[in-house]
Image (cartoon, coloured by chain):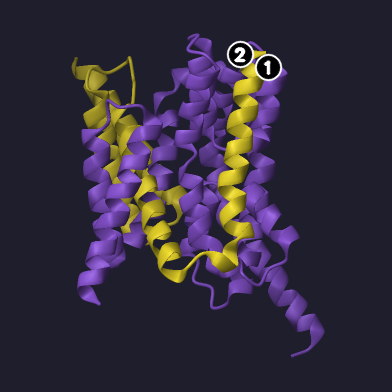
Amino acid sequence: MTTVVALLLVGAGSLAYRMVPLLGAARVPEAGSRVAGWAGVSVLAAVTVRGVLHHHDRTIPCAVPVAVVALAVALVAAARGRGILVVLGAGAGTYLALSTVIGAVT
Amino acid sequence: MSQTVVVARHRDEVLEGVRAMAPMLVVYAPFGLLVGAAVAASDNPVAAWLSTWTIYGGAAHLAVLDVLHNGTGVLGAAVVGLLINARMVAYAASLAPHWRTASARSRVAAAGMLTDATWGLTVNHPSDSAAGRRRFYFGAGFTLWLGWPAFVTVGVLLGRWVQHVPVATLLPAMTLGALVVPQLRTRPGLAAGTAATGVAAVTSGLDGGLALVLAAAAGGSAAGLVHWRAS
């Protein structure tokens, strides 16, 4: 019962978060919409940083620095206008190469 | 312009959204499998699976199930989930100008499909009309709306293996980072990204929902300040 109530609360709240600004789109001022866009970019940046800083990999001793380097390579590829699969290939490839080297050395 | 040409152009805009989202599905697959594994391990797998469509955010879904699993209770789980998904308000509000002339039904449908990747692809899409952007949004959004629950469902059955492939859990972060990059080409966007990155690094030990709200506030304020000083 606890699980159902919690999931219902979060589900209803999440739907309201999405629906209220869109259903009341005419009342959202242009400036508010612009600031919300910057807040959205900020959230995506923060999710990216947290995803890397909280990365776990039991097979290597320094998973977070390796993840940071892999992310940097992926972002450089993205900045050069590469497609998402190339971006991820570059990032994941860097991670796998570095973790293989580190695993062999340690 | 003939009706056939208009219909073909509209279809092309929807298909453009589908094509933009298709590679994202590959990326989101491991994350969906992880969420599916958490759904299978929950006290009520059916309720946890059904909330895939209402919560519609892997991070919030995982966090709620994790908090419940650790016995923190309804209130704690709800607060964590609602804080993590609070970013949807910003996403929806930023899209509002493109939906002012749309029907209520299509706005409700759009709200049901809104999440990080759909928003990120749409704001980066160089469409010259609100209607074109909406068609792109529906193409991208509907693709993920079908794909995400499918991955969660498969994850219920065999999601545990993803935890043994560490690089797979890193892919969503790389994807979202790649969506941020085009926004950094404007000064307010760069200010937002820089401030949010700093705040996220400093608050990495905090609960995810609170940290994201702080990052959004810092990034939004920094970008607003840069925009205000420039204008």
Identify the residue position indicated by label 1 in the image: B45
Q: Which amino acid type is shown beneath numbered disc 1?
A: Pro
Indicate the amino acid at tag 2: Ser
User: Which quarter of the rendered picture does the N terminus of chain B lie within?
Assistant: bottom right
The residue furthest right is: B3
Check if mark 2's residue and mark 1's residue have beta carbons within 8 Å. Answer: yes
Q: Secondary structure at mark 2?
A: loop
Q: Residue B201: where, in percent of width, then height? A: 23, 36
Residue found 70% across the figure and 53% down from its top: B109
Q: Colour of chain A?
A: yellow
Q: Colour of chain B?
A: purple
- Which residue bears the numbered disc 2? B42
> Closest to the observer: A4 or B17?
A4
Q: Quadrant of residue B198?
A: top left
B207 horizontally vs B202: left or right: right
- Residue for point 63% across, 36% down: A12
Rendering quarter of residue B211: top left
The answer to whether residue B195 shows anywhere in this view is yes
Give SS at disc 1.
helix
